[in-house]
Image: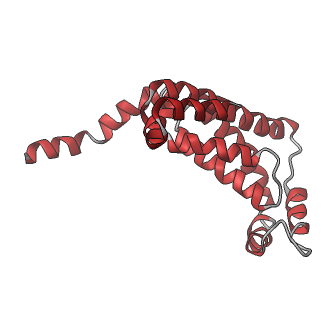
Amino acid sequence: MLLYFLLLFILNYWGKNMMIDALRQNKNISILLAVLRVYIGYTWIMAGWGKIASGQFDASGFLQGALANATGEHPAVQEWWVVFLKNIAIPNIEVFNLLVPWGELFVGLGLLIGCFTKTAVFFGMAMNFSYMFSGTTSTNPQLVLLSMFILVSAMNAGRYGVDGMIMPTLKEKLFANKTREIKDAA
């Protein structure tokens, strides 16, 4: 529903040719992106915290289910992903049992407060795709689609968050020497 209103607002207000510019620069759209970002962040936090709080998260059953979905006439899991699961994920299940819940929690926290928003949404999408590669859908396609808006919006999705407060200062300090060099050369 939120996605529909976001698209409708952008297309009616600016037209189809300026959609990406609007996502990246418009302050009104940054408010909608902040709501979207908080929704996705909340979804990730709840998924991660549920696994951490229970203290009983074990990905081995999920991974074995993914292997079972790799057989048959129309397998849901492709062979190249099965190779990854058999040779990397399953032998290192303890690492994945730690990475999955904490990764979900930190992605959610980054999105919720708008800190390193693009990085958080990138790793969130990486987890979504890994779940889909393993043969499950659930809310993963929806989260990927919504995350694309945040990824395309560049810094505008974090304008009303920690990114909006720290990035201008960080850019100034990191790129101050390059600006001086250009001015000195002129």
Q: Quadrant of the N terminus?
A: top right
Point out residue 168 in the picture as x, y percentages from the top left corner: 37, 31
Picture quadrant where residue 150 is located: top right
Residue 175 image offset from top left, x and y in percent? 28, 42
Residue displayed at 66% across by 34% down: 4
Residue 185: x, y in percent?
9, 48
Q: Looking at the image, which residue is at 76% across and 39% down?
A: 48
* 123 lies left or right of 176: right
The residue lying toward the viewer, choosing from 12 and 169, is 12
Of the pair 122 and 104, the residue shown nearer to us: 122
Which quarter of the image is occupied by the C terminus?
top left
Quarter of the figure with residue 120: top right
Residue 52 in view, yes or no? yes
Is residue 161 something that shows in the picture? no
Q: Position of residue 118 (x, y in %)?
A: 53, 43
The answer to whether residue 173 is above or below residue 88 is: above
Taking depth in this image into account, of 22 and 47 the one nearest to the observer is: 22
Q: Is residue 102 above or below residue 73?
A: above
What residue is drawn where x is 75% and y is 69%?
A: 81
Q: How does the figure colour the protein chain or chains? A: secondary structure
The tally of labels here is 0
Give the vertical position of 169 relative to 48 (above or below): above
Q: Is residue 144 left or right of residue 78?
A: left
